[in-house]
Image (cartoon, rainbow, N blue to C red):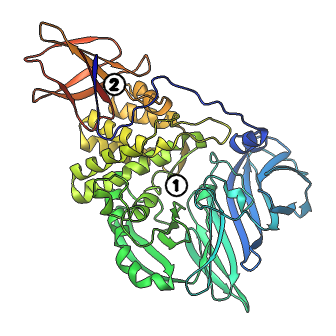
Amino acid sequence: MKSFIIGLGLTLGLSTHVHSQNTFTRADTLRGSITPERVWWDLGYYHLKVEVFPESKSIKGSNLVRYRVKSSNQILQIDLQEPLIITSVVQDGEKLNFKREGAAHFITLKKEQVPGQVEELLISYEGKPVEAVRPPWDGGITWVKDSNGKHFIASSNQGIGSSVWWPTKDHPADEVDSLMISVTVPKGLMDVSNGRLVNIEMGPTSDTFHWSVANPINDYGVNINIGDYVHFGEKFEGEKGTLDMDYFVLRENLEKAKVHFEDARKMMEAFEHWFGPYPFYEDGFKLVDAPYLGMEHQSSVTYGNGYQKGYRGRDLSGTGWGMKFDFIIIHESGHEWFANNITYSDVADMWIHESFTNYSESLFLDYHFGKEAGQEYVRGTRMNISNDIPIIGKYGVNKRGSGDMYYKGGNLLNMLREILNDDEKWRGILRGLNQEFYHQTVSTQQVESYIAQAFGMDLKPIFDQYLRDVRIPILEYYYSDDQTLNYRWINCLPHFEMPVDVSLGGEKLRLSVNTRWSQLQVKEIADVELDLDYYVGVEKMR
């Protein structure tokens, strides 16, 4: 007979690793892989021009694509999702032919593409973009009105893809180096997009807002936000100098925003401490009212949490600590470091964005309320873990992994901190990641290797277990008659090994554990109690 004890809030996964059966289409490959028509050219610059027509829920515009030729090819892939249509493609004044296959458009180039040269395409398009039904999760354009009856419009498209509303190289591996976005809206409305406002062209019936982004930006981070906005802001004296922090809110929200957005400054203080300088000083930081919950658009973080603490007024950890901050301000801003600075090169590695940013919530609490507050919070989020499918998805087909990348991933990182047992070194690793991979797209292997090298320890068994398997390891133990503690890991991969901190009769010690039985002479026979910050179970054999 066995007794079974498991760490706080832990939901035990499957006893075997069951692979889900997925069927992927050619459309999945065209979206999710670096196709031959994508690999040969490198993005340099976009100038996206969009005119928005709220009454008909339609848009019309163009995108100037500047790129550097890496190798010879005469076919170039640009993506734009139906029902939008590309009306023309022009290079050096000549119209080009293209073939459409779903969202993928294969453009036949007339001019020889010489490696090393920089070329441009002008792509014009129009139509009614997909309307978001449940933003930001399904994505598209949201068309609503504020309480004063004025149009309130925004884009959100991480999952569905940026090509849902503008023509792009819709794959995360290649970020554009810089961007200009010019948005024309009806008189009386304002557009807020990424980067800095360069100028406003005033017209008789419409105005055009020109925004410039100086830093590399992922396509899904580009956004439009249109409404009756008013502005206030502040200066933050940070690690790289003076940072402009600007807030664009609906007129009706101005007074409460001036109080509620104090969390933004507190966020910046905490995250510069833990992660290093804000990655986009040149473009500034913005919080922008949006007609949906919120999203991590680079330097233009959108906000729709109802001006309340927690996640829509509730604590996702069940500990009380989640009501000490506005979840959307903290979480979505945390993505400026993990998602916008360090960006996955394949959506299968989305944990790089979400695990670290989920963990950032507890680090915010750690900074402002002490370490135990952060630890309690991250442990409390375990009640949201499903242990259904692996956190890492399928490569090359735009397939993300389990939603456990949030809470399970956050607990994995918290556990690594405990294993390291050196908080300053751990802080150095988090800051080092943002320095080593500054403004880069990366793979899981790069992130794992960096952390392991900084640890000075082989972490592959731990990453494999928590990112690529669904089972939660169990520390199985029993006592021999001669007061010998026998212990091993079960419910895990065959090569899994990880040290764990335990308490025996009040004595704290660290056990080195793998899947083979190990022994330890003890002073007295007592139940093994786990350090709660390890996301594992414990089981005593009788």
Left or right: 456 with respect to 68?
A: left
Give the amino acid at mark 1: Asn
| Element marked by disc 1 | loop
- Name the residue furthest bottom: 204
Which residue appears at 32% of the width and 37% of the height? 415
- Name the residue furthest front: 1
Q: How much space separates mark 2 and mark 1, taking CA atoms?
A: 36 Å
Between residues 29 and 195, which one lies in front from this camera angle?
A: 29
Which residue appears at 25% of the width and 44% of the height? 424
526 vs 338: above or below: above
Give the amino acid at mark 2: Ile
| Element marked by disc 2 | strand
Which residue appears at 57% of the width and 68% of the height? 194
Left or right: 521 with respect to 245?
A: left
465 vs 424: above or below: above
Q: Give the residue pinned by disc 2.
A: 474
Left or right: 324 with respect to 348?
A: left
The disc at residue 340 is 1
The image position of residue 378, as x and y in percent, is: 32, 47
